[in-house]
Image: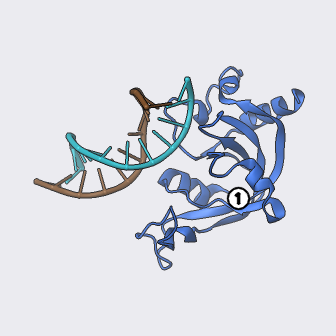
Chain colours: A blue, B cyan, C brown
DNA sequence: GCCAACGTTGGC
DNA sequence: GCCAACGTTGGC
């Protein structure tokens, strides 16, 4: 039984089109430096889990779906002093941060804006819609996932 | 272990 | 650019 998730990215930093342009349309979801988000990736994201791809900040919206193609392994960018996400407290012996690999499944024909999502019955309980929600990796109910996917398709 | 200061996220 | 919400840090 697959689980469902949502990941955030600022499109100016890494967008769904960036993912679409990757070899095999796959990337490692590195750079997450929040414990709660890390725990979801490290402990709960499984092969085949479906993931909503969310663009934050610039026209905040859900823009597509990807899936987990590799389960958690240490985020080596934390070991690189040159990397923006360098963390001296993470070592190869005791890695502090983890990541998964995700592969693009589909880019929605249109983006579903945050504003729009707030008005959809059935999505009221989404973590994403909570005021002040800052989690960059969060679980999504199957019910919510389905509502969003159906909406993206029926109004294409 | 408390909590004030500080930094970051992210909607608007 | 503003600022609310929160996470993290570090002194005590």
Q: Residue at x 68, y 64 (%)?
A: A71
Residue in the image at 81% along x and 65% along y: A23
Front one among A25 and C8: A25
Task: Work out which residue is located at the far bottom of the displayed protein and give it.
Answer: A93
Please rate how many residues cluster around mark 1, counting C-alpha atoms within 10 Å: few if below 14, some from 14 to 19, many from 20. many
Instruction: Using the image, name the chain to which the residue with label 1 belongs.
Output: A
Secondary element at tag 1: loop
Q: Residue at x 63, y 25 (%)?
A: A124
User: Height in image: B10 above or below C8?
Assistant: above
Q: Does the image show residue A126?
A: yes
Using the image as rendered, state which of residue A146 and residue A90 is in the foreground.
A90
Q: Which residue is mark 1?
A: A46
Can residue A1 be seen?
no
At x 56%, y 59%, the residue is A31
Is C4 on the left or on the right of A111, as rendered?
left
Decide: is A13 above or below A86: above
Answer left or right for A94 relative to A149: left
Q: Position of residue A68 (x, y in %)?
A: 74, 58
* Left/right of residue B5 with respect to residue A37 in the rendered view: left
In the rendered image of this protein, does residue A144 appear above or below residue A14? above
Q: Is the residue A19 above or below the residue A80 in the image?
A: above
Q: Quadrant of residue A146?
A: top right
Q: Where, quadrant-wise, is the C terminus of chain A in this rendering?
A: top right
Residue A26's quadrant in the figure?
A: bottom right
Task: Indicate left or right for A48 with A10 as reference.
Answer: right
């Amino acid at each position: 039984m697959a689980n469902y998730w949502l990941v955030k990215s600022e499109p100016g930093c890494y967008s769904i089109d960036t993912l679409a342009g990757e070899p095999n349309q796959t990337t490692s979801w590195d750079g997450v430096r929040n414990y709660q988000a890390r725990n979801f990736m490290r402990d709960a994201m499984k092969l085949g889990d479906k993931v909503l791809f969310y663009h934050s900040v610039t026209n905040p919206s859900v823009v597509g779906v990807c899936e987990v193609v590799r389960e958690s392994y240490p985020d080596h960018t934390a070991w690189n002093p040159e990397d923006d996400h360098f963390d001296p407290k993470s070592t190869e012996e005791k890695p502090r941060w983890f990541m998964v690999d995700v592969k693009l499944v589909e880019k929605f024909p249109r983006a579903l804006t945050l504003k729009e999502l707030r008005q959809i019955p059935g999505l009221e309980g989404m973590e994403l819609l909570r005021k002040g929600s800052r989690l960059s990796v969060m679980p999504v109910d199957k019910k919510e996932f389905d509502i969003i996917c159906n909406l993206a398709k029926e109004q294409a």
